[in-house]
Image: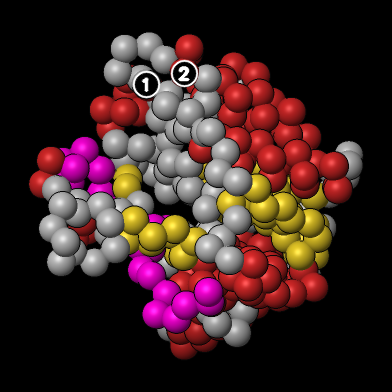
Amino acid sequence: MKFIHAARALWLGVIAATAAKLRTNDGEATVKEMSTGSRPRTVALGFHGEYHRKVFWEQSPAAPPKCSDYFQSADNIHKNIVKPLQDAGVEVRIYFHSNFGACPQMDSRLVGLFGTNLRNHTFTARLPQIVDSYLRVVRMIADDIGQDDDAAIVLLRFDAQYKKTITSLNIDWDKIHFAFRDKQWNWDHCRMTSDLFHILPRQYVDPFLQAVEWSGDNTKSAGYCNHGGNPHFVYEPLSKSVGVGKLAFIEQGFLSSRPPQEMSPEEMQQATPSQFIEISRACSTTTEC
């Protein structure tokens, strides 16, 4: 009996030691340990969309504005995306396309926040469709990394915040990843997915660009599935070009990036709040112009 207890204690000790090795200082596993597929040597972070936008969505003049504001999300993105990758030994390169801000000083502040990791960027006037910014930044990255198959692309929005670090996710770096499926009706009828976060192996850049162009083409709309110039519809063409086996989701189920307090009871029946990513509508308290 003593031998059995001693053996059991030894085995539990081995399990504990092994688990400890699979943890970083903050208690989360590294990219190499938590991921499958080939860990990329380089990760290109591509930001797209408006980095600063203030909109009064409510009819009441007393209602506060809602913003797309990178300055409110920068610390969260650095903590959960940039630093964990760097701590795992990955070279992080940053690229972005965005609209001009309210003044040149604000644009300069954005560039300065990215520091030496910023490889390339461009500001333009507002483009006609949401997909246009995706296309600009992916092409920018592809031109820089060339045919480097040890590189992966992560596409992000300026106004998204993360509840988990990228290195705590079970990512297969050989697959294209979406954050999650859209509301159940949207997924069942249109194969709509979240457009907030994508992981893209270098070898799938061309089919991904083609899928984004197809998703943004309003002539491809059918019935309820109104494309509206956005990238929510890339899953269908990608499933045909690279195959369903090369597509994956960070979270399973039918989810929403909206915080629970902003979701109606009807929305809650079709989707639940994501435990990974959330849109921040907070506005900066300081002005640059």
Task: Answer whether residue 285 is magenta in the image.
Answer: yes
Residue beneath the point at 52% across and 53% down: 50
Q: Which residues are magenta?
A: 267-289
Quadrant in which the N terminus is drawn: bottom left
- Whether residue 53 sits left or right of residue 128 in the image: it is left
Q: Position of residue 19 (x, y in %)?
A: 57, 75
| Residue 235 in view | no
Q: Count all numbered tags in the image, as a single digit.
A: 2
Instruction: Provide the secondary structure element on which disc 1 rests.
Output: loop
Q: Which residue is mark 2?
A: 218
The one of 251 and 104 positioned closer to us in this rendering? 104
Mark 2–mark 1 contact, CB under 8 Å? yes
Q: Which residue is mark 1?
A: 226
| Residue 260 in view | yes
Residue beneath the point at 55% across and 44% down: 126
Which amino acid type is shown beneath numbered disc 1?
Answer: Asn
Q: How far is mark 2 from mark 1, CA to CA?
A: 7 Å
Disc 2 crowd rating (10 Å Cα; few below 14, some 14-19, many 20+) is: some
Q: Quadrant of residue 103?
A: bottom right
Q: Position of residue 190 (x, y in %)?
A: 37, 22
Q: Position of residue 192 (x, y in %)?
A: 40, 30
Q: Quadrant of residue 211?
A: top right
Which color scheme did the rendering employ for the protein? secondary structure
Task: Answer whether residue 100 is magenta in the image.
Answer: no
The one of 1 and 236 positioned closer to us in this rendering? 236
The one of 114 and 17 positioned closer to us in this rendering? 114
Q: Is residue 1 above or below residue 143?
A: below
- Whether residue 145 sits left or right of residue 170 in the image: it is right
Q: Position of residue 273 (x, y in %)?
A: 29, 54
